[in-house]
Amino acid sequence: MVEYQLYNYAEFYPLAVVPTNENGVSSFETGLGDLPVPVARSPFQGPAPELIAQNNQKLDNENSIRQKYINSWIKPEEAKTLALQINEDTSKIMAIIARSMGNYRNIKSFLINTPDSLRNLAIDLLEIISEKDLRDTKEEILTDHLMNTAKTDISFPDSEERLFNEYVLNPRVANEKLLPWHSNLFKVLPAELKINASDDPSLITSFLNDNIEIADSENYYRVPITPAGVLELTVADTKSRSICFVAICRSLGIPARLEPGSNVPQYFHGSKWHDVYFSDQKPPSQEKGYLRLISSESNPVPEYYIHFTIARFENGRYKTLEYDYNKRINDFKEDLQLTPGHYMLVTGNRLNDSKILSDITFFDLRENEHKTISVSLRKDISPPEILGKIDLLNFLNTIKAGAGLKSISVEKRIVMLWIEPDKEPTKHIFNDLPPQQQHLQ
């Protein structure tokens, strides 16, 4: 099987998978695009002016509708009033409400209806879930997770508060649809498992081995089945089974997660994380290799999935390790504990004309080896294109002198922007400028 791959988000994705013929030859015809083999192409002719005008009118209408909706959201003063009403930290409540955006009614109702004795736990729950979940999740789902987590009789010392919040209280395991699985799991789990699993979490592995059939090919789009759905169907794909394992652990008060990077399910027991492999899986070596990521890049600082990814060779292809999207290389503060094997580092730097400068590095990681990999991005070394010239002194004398322009000197370098306030590129500029402040001084 030969994969013809397309670059996207610091990875090469299969555009097509074509088997070889009896002579070992595979061929594939494709259109033009960002393929590993560059193709020079002429740009399309731009749209007619009247079409551009029509499109701008539609964008203005969309912006107006969106802004009216945003203006209907709860105001900071109202969020502060809510915090005082429930006698909680105003800064915490205001931050939670602001992040919930248009879902503020569900979050407000959840906070008000939560018993006083569980309010701190409810706030911990709202602070640990992602911004997307804050914007999407209904009150009844949050209540189900809160109330059922509170029922677990396993206590955590204050020093392990983060362990509890992230890996027991947190209702989000991976990218599954967030539903009230706590109550559904309790209905179908055997009583003996609920009693004994906290002392021996491997019982959960055995339970899933005995009760869940794996049919990866049936889940064609690889959309995860919810934990409750796995137990109801008794058939699942591999990843959905892993998510279900983590959910069962958390519902019983056992810290569990999908390991960042490899997505191997893990439970925390005896002061350490334990990998979980099911009966249809072959466990790799339990020994780990250690990888440290460094970079001297500062403009931009490399971010995962934006500028680089790491993949491990498994079953004939490289499988990308799943770390947080946009995670800056500076935030990989600890060595990555990885299974020994063959690895690939992909970097990509997208230029202003949408061309991509990519690079691929292969390396091996052995058992107990400590390896350091430097992540560097290819740069465009061609001279910048001069789009036009301007008589700066004459220009400054002809425009209206504002407070910010009086101190401008033509002897210094100046960055000047022509912007359209409601256009998408302008929004990107405003987001990208603050991190570049030190380079513009």
Image (cartoon, rainbow, N blue to C red):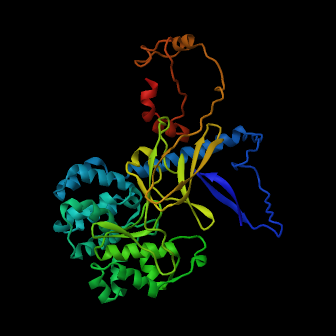
Across and down, in percent, residue 297 comes to 49, 37
- Whether residue 228 is situated above or below residue 7 in the rendered picture: below
Q: Is residue 57 visible?
A: yes
Asked where in the image residue 232 lies, by quadrant, the reply is bottom left
| Residue displayed at 54% across by 13% down | 398
Q: Is residue 285 left or right of residue 38?
A: left
Q: Is residue 357 left or right of residue 201?
A: right
Q: Is residue 67 left or right of residue 33?
A: left
Asked where in the image residue 249 lies, by quadrant, the reply is bottom left
Q: Which quadrant holds the C terminus?
A: top left
- Whether residue 190 is situated above or below residue 365 in the rendered picture: below
| Residue displayed at 45% across by 87% down | 211
Asked where in the image residue 184 lies, by quadrant, the reply is bottom left
| Residue displayed at 46% across by 80% down | 230
Q: Nearer the viewer, residue 142 or 15?
A: 15
Q: Is residue 259 left or right of residue 27?
A: left
Q: Which quadrant holds the N terminus?
A: bottom right
Across and down, in percent, residue 182 comes to 34, 77
Give the farthest residue toward the right.
23
